[in-house]
Image: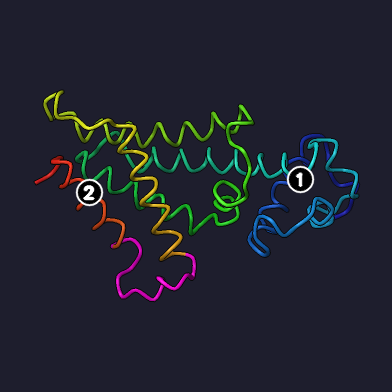
Amino acid sequence: MARDSYHHGNLRQALVDATVSLIEDKGPMAFTLAEAARQAGVSAAAPYRHFSGREQLLEEVARQGFLDFAARLEAAFDEGRPSALSAFLRMGQAYLGFAAAKPGFYMAMFESGISIAGNADLALAAQQAEAALVRGAEALFARLPADRRPPATMVANHVWAMSHGVVELFGRGRPGGRSPIPADQMLESGLLIYLRGLGVIE
């Protein structure tokens, strides 16, 4: 791509796209800002017009990833239709689907070592994803007496951790990937066992 082909607003996204590609090829820790610039077709100095350094570029990749991730979770929940349980289970599948479809973003979000709390825009995007899971948990517990409802944020974080574990063990070529049980079934069975343990479902 010619270096003079960018107009205002394109360079920033071109660098994000280049970084996603590099992460998918090399992992989130094994590329340089100069490589991202070269892949985007710009000079080594060009990224500094938009990013202070490699970490800030990674943070932007992660921010965009969290926004997409949150939107996928919300779409999967679909206002709890046709039932809160089926909607909640779909959110788990959406988690796995995002990790499979957007590995570069996923790795930037969870495996790059960036500080989410240190970037307000990134933290807000991550909170949107967590809030989607919390809403799903609240819908599951709505029919329970108030004194029997588990903390929705705790449940959301447990589900997040379980989903992340399934991605790492069964969805990314790890040894667990040889399991005869597909990753989506592994996650759904784990969620059902967990929810039964909480007394949410029979």
What is the crowding at mark 2: few (fewer than 14 residues within 10 Å), some, or many (at least 20)? some
Horizontally, residue 86 falls left or right of residue 51, namely left
Q: For mark 2, give the secondary structure.
A: helix
- CA gap, disc 2 to disc 1? 39 Å
**Residue bearing the label numbered 2:** 194
Q: Which mark is residue 54?
A: 1
Q: Residues within 10 Å of mark 1 (few under 14, many from 20)?
A: some
Left or right placement of residue 25 versus residue 9 in this view: left
The verdict on residue 178 being magenta is yes
Disc with the residue nearer the chain's start (2 vs 1):
1
Residue type beneath disc 2: Tyr
- Answer whether residue 114 is magenta in the image: no
Q: Which residue lies at the image location 81% right of the left edge and 57% below the top edge?
A: 35
| Magenta residues (range) | 172-185
- Image quarter of residue 30: bottom right
At which x and y percent is residue 1?
84, 56
Q: Residue at x 15, y 23 (%)?
A: 146
View extreme (left): residue: 202
